[in-house]
Image: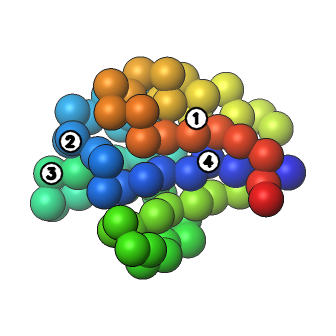
């Protein structure tokens, strides 16, 4: 199973992820990106968001990761 991981504390609010993958990403009222329908966890650095992906959802989220200048979005194997 693959997941998308968002290290929200690194987000700079550019909106690229929401522009290329609006089914999965949106901009929050605080100006930073949010991963839709995700699990949110408070970690030492800030908020970590994760969502399990279906095979057909991987490419769209990889596009979001590739478009992110802060490199805070990762599509990877679930631990």
Residue nearest the observer in this picture, 6 or 35: 6
In contact (CB < 8 Å): disc 1 and disc 4: yes
Residue pointed to by mark 2:
13
**Which label's residue is closer to the chain start, 3 or 1?**
3
Give the class, few, some or many, for how many residues have Cα within 10 Å of label 1's Cα (few <14, many ≥20). many
**Which label's residue is closer to the chain start, 1 or 2?**
2
From mark 2 to mark 4, how far is it between C-alphas? 18 Å
Count of numbered badges drawn on the protein: 4
**Which label's residue is closer to the chain start, 2 or 3?**
2
From mark 3 to mark 1, how far is it between C-alphas? 20 Å
In contact (CB < 8 Å): disc 2 and disc 3: yes
Residue at the extreme bottom: 42
Residue at the location (64% across, 39% down)?
75
Image coordinates of residue 25 in percent, x first then y, are: 42, 45
Q: Is residue 5 above or below residue 16?
A: below
**Which label's residue is closer to the chain start, 4 or 3?**
4
Residue at the extreme right: 1
**Which label's residue is closer to the chain start, 2 or 4?**
4
Image coordinates of residue 24 in percent, x first then y, are: 50, 46
Residue 31 badge: 3
**Which label's residue is closer to the chain start, 1 or 4?**
4
Residue at the location (54% across, 65% down)?
38
Give the class, few, some or many, for how many residues have Cα within 10 Å of label 4's Cα (few <14, many ≥20). many
Residue pointed to by mark 4:
4
Q: Is residue 27 left or right of residue 54?
A: left
Residue pointed to by mark 1:
61
Residue nearest the observer in this picture, 65 or 24: 65
From mark 4 to mark 3, how far is it between C-alphas? 20 Å
From mark 1 to mark 4, how far is it between C-alphas? 7 Å
Residue at the location (60% across, 28% down)?
62
């Amino acid at each position: 199973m693959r997941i998308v991981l968002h290290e929200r504390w690194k987000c700079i609010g550019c909106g690229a992820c929401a522009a290329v993958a609006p089914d999965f990403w949106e901009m929050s009222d605080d100006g930073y990106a949010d991963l839709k329908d995700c699990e949110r966890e408070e970690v030492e650095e800030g908020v970590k968001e994760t969502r399990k992906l279906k095979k057909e959802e991987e490419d769209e989220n990889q596009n979001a990761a590739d478009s992110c200048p802060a490199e805070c979005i990762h599509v990877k194997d679930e631990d």
